[in-house]
């Protein structure tokens, strides 16, 4: 059944045949599921759960070779995640693929790069620290779990399905434009500007056992997070101007502030928008 075309639908959506719409929808679902596989695998990876390749499994290599391979894998992820998020890349890419498939493709490429890192990671198993007391182990794992929950919760606080490309695929299937997003700062975004990145940092660093390989992974990912945030914030200021500057002044970047800042007390901390362009 062909859905009526709304007057403000994108040209791509208007000209899509029914089989193409079904294909885009199926593709969006596959990309969504692939990313969630990569996310669950990340939790298993950093916790060295041996049902999948982990941060301490695999064939040992000389230190220099292992370091080069591991840093190269994180760099591959960083380049993909940043380059494909650029407006110029999106404009060029959507000349090749349907516009509604752009975000799912970004999500799929992210999942592919993460999974490549897990599979080809070179173990560096020298222990930096190890916690042996069960109470402390469970406390650290609890803190790590809070980090993952912050990450997931922050995606739903914005628009989880838009962020991972399902909204775009569903809108294309229905022959409708992607719904406009409101610029807002729901719950956790009122105390920290980038809770998704905060969740990632907690998740990769809160470990009862820290090997050299885990430390390399966590350090490289931390460096990428902050480099990515530098460019993302620059884009946000360019896009939203004074509104984002006021938000940035009143809300910290990745370390939550649980009390009102002076600027918020003066009325500058009103609910504002939060775009969905995120480096995950």
Image (cartoon, helix red, strand yellow):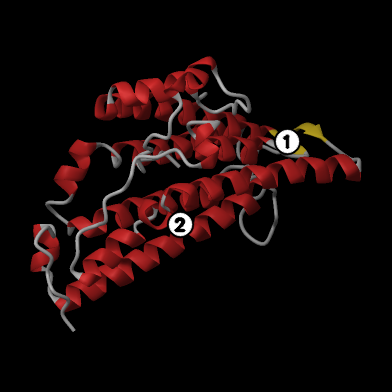
Residue 82: quarter of image:
top left
Q: Nearer the viewer, residue 168 or 8?
A: 8
The kind of secondary structure element at disc 1 is: strand
The kind of secondary structure element at disc 2 is: helix
Q: How many marks can you see?
A: 2
Query: Label 1 belongs to which residue?
Result: 210
Q: Nearer the viewer, residue 15 or 245?
A: 245
For the point 55% across and 19% down, the residue is 261
Instruction: Determine whether, in the image, residue 215 is placed left or right of residue 196.
Output: right
Q: Is residue 59 visible?
A: no
User: In the image, is residue 89 above or below residue 67?
Assistant: below
Query: Label 2 belongs to which residue?
Result: 35
Q: Position of residue 208 (x, y in %)?
A: 78, 39
Q: Position of residue 75 (x, y in %)?
A: 43, 34
Q: Is residue 263 visible?
A: yes
User: Which image quarter is the N terminus in?
Assistant: bottom left
User: In the image, is residue 220 above or below residue 102?
Assistant: above
For the point 58% across and 40% down, the residue is 199
For the point 58% across and 42% down, the residue is 122
Dot 2 alpha-carbon crowd within 10 angstroms: few under 14, some 14 to 19, many 20 or more:
many
């Amino acid at each position: 059944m062909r859905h009526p075309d709304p007057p403000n639908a994108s040209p791509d959506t208007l000209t899509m045949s029914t089989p193409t719409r079904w294909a885009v929808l199926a593709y969006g679902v596959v990309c969504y599921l692939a990313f969630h596989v990569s996310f669950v695998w990340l939790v298993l990876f950093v916790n060295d759960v041996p049902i999948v390749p982990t941060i301490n499994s695999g064939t040992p290599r000389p230190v220099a070779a292992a370091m080069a391979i591991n840093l190269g894998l994180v760099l591959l992820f960083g380049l993909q995640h940043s380059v494909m998020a650029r407006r110029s890349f999106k404009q060029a890419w959507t000349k090749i693929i349907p516009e509604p498939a752009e975000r799912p493709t970004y999500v799929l490429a992210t999942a592919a790069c993460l999974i490549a890192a897990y599979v080809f990671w070179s173990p560096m198993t020298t222990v930096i620290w190890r916690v042996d007391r069960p109470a402390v182990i469970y406390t650290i794992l609890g803190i790590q779990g809070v980090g993952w929950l912050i990450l997931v919760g922050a995606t739903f606080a914005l628009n989880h399905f838009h962020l991972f490309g399902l909204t775009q695929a569903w809108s294309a299937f229905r022959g409708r434009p992607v719904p406009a997003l409101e610029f807002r700062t729901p719950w956790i975004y009122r105390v920290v500007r980038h809770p998704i990145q905060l969740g990632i940092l907690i998740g990769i660093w809160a470990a009862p056992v820290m090997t050299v390989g885990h430390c390399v992974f966590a350090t490289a990912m931390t460096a990428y997070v902050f480099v990515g945030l530098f460019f993302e914030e620059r884009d946000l200021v360019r896009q939203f101007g004074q509104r984002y500057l006021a938000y940035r002044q009143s809300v910290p970047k990745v370390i939550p502030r649980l009390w009102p800042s002076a600027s918020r007390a003066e009325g500058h901390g009103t609910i504002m928008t939060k775009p969905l362009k995120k480096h995950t």
